[in-house]
Image (tube, rainbow, N blue to C red):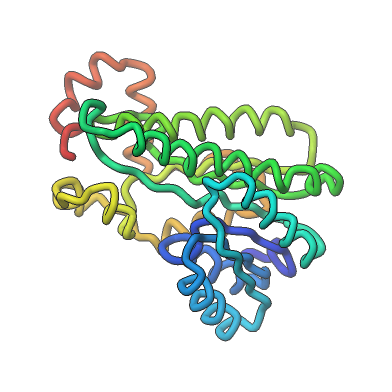
Amino acid sequence: MNQKLKDRYVVITGASGGIGEKMAALAAASGAHPILIARRADLLAAAAKRISDQYGVTCTYYPLDVSDLDAVAQTFARILDSVPQIDVLVNNAGFGIFNTVEEATLDEMTSMFEVNVFGLIACTKMVLPGMRARNDGHIINIASQAGKLATPKSSLYSATKHAVLGFTNSLRMELAGTGIHVTSVNPGPIQTNFFNIADQSGTYVKNVQRFMLDPDKVSEKIVSAMMTEKREINLPGWMNAGSSFYQLMPRVFEKLAGKALSKK
C-alpha cells in the first residue's frame, strides 16, 4: 500500500495487461483512481471492470495507440475534461523486436521509435502543464537495462531505451526545484508477453528464463515509488551492477561477458 496515492489520478499507458494492468490494480488498492491506456478497447474494458469491481474505485480507460501523436493530444484532452488532474503518469507502453541491424527493417525501426520514444514524450508533454501549474506530480518512464547496456540483436530496441533514459534524465533536471518527480525504471527481462513479439524464436527466453523478473514484484516496486523522490528503479541489482561495470570498463566487460550478451 502507498498512502500517498489516496484519491490520486494515475494514468498508465500499455495497461491492457502485463505490468501495466498489475500497476493499475496495485494503485487502486492504495486508493488511487487508475486511468488505463492501450490499443485494445476490449482488453482495457475487461481490466478496468476487474479493478473497479475489486477495489471500489473509479477506473476508466481510453483506447489509444501512442504512436499516433494527434490521437495522443485528443485523448489526453478528453481525460483532463473528465478528471480534476493527472497526478501520476506511467509511460509503460512499448515493444521490442530482437534482430540484428542487417535483419531489422526500417519499418520496425520506425515503429519502435514512434511508440517507445515519440509516444512517451508526447504523453509527457500532455501532463506537464497541469503538473507545473500545481507544482505537483510524478512522471515514471519505463526504460530498460537495455538502455544502459546494449547487447547483440537488440541494437534498435536499445537505441530507443537509451533515448528514453536521456530524455528522462534531462527532464528531471529541467524540473529540479519543482514538486514534480521524475523516475526511470530499468528492468531486465520480465515474465510477460513482451517476448511474444520481441523473441519469436523463443531462444532468448529459453536462455534467460531463470533470470526473469517476477512481474508482480516489479509492479510493486514501481507503485511503492509513486509520488516519492525515487530517481531510478534498477532491477535486478546484479544486472545493474553489470551495466555500471560496462560504463567503467567497456572493453573488458565485452571480452568477459561476450558469450552471455549473445544469447538472443
Residue 72 shows in the view = yes
Residue found at x 51% / y 37%: 117
Q: Seen in the image, is 21 located left or right of residue 88?
A: left
Q: Position of residue 122 (x, y in %)?
A: 63, 42
* Camera-nearest residue between 160 and 109: 109
How far from the left and from the top, in percent, is residue 221?
50, 55
Q: Quadrant of the C terminus?
A: top left
Tell me, yes or no, if residue 241 can be seen here. no
Number of labels in the image equals: 0
Q: Is residue 188 above or below residue 152?
A: below
Q: Horizontal and vertical percent for residue 7?
A: 74, 69
Image spot of residue 175 (x, y percent): 73, 33
143 horizontally vs 246: left or right: right
* Residue at the limit of the structure toward the right, as seen here: 133
Q: Quadrant of the N terminus?
A: bottom right
Of residues 241 and 195, which is closer to you in this image?
A: 195
The quarter of the displayed image where residue 149 is located: top left
Q: Is residue 56 above or below residue 152?
A: below
Left or right: 150, with 62 as reference point: left
Identified at 62% across, 52% down, the residue is 71
Question: What residue do we see at 26% from left, 33% from top?
Answer: 104
Q: Residue at x 32, y 38 (%)?
A: 239
Compared with residue 25, is residue 197 higher up or lower down, i.e. above or below? above
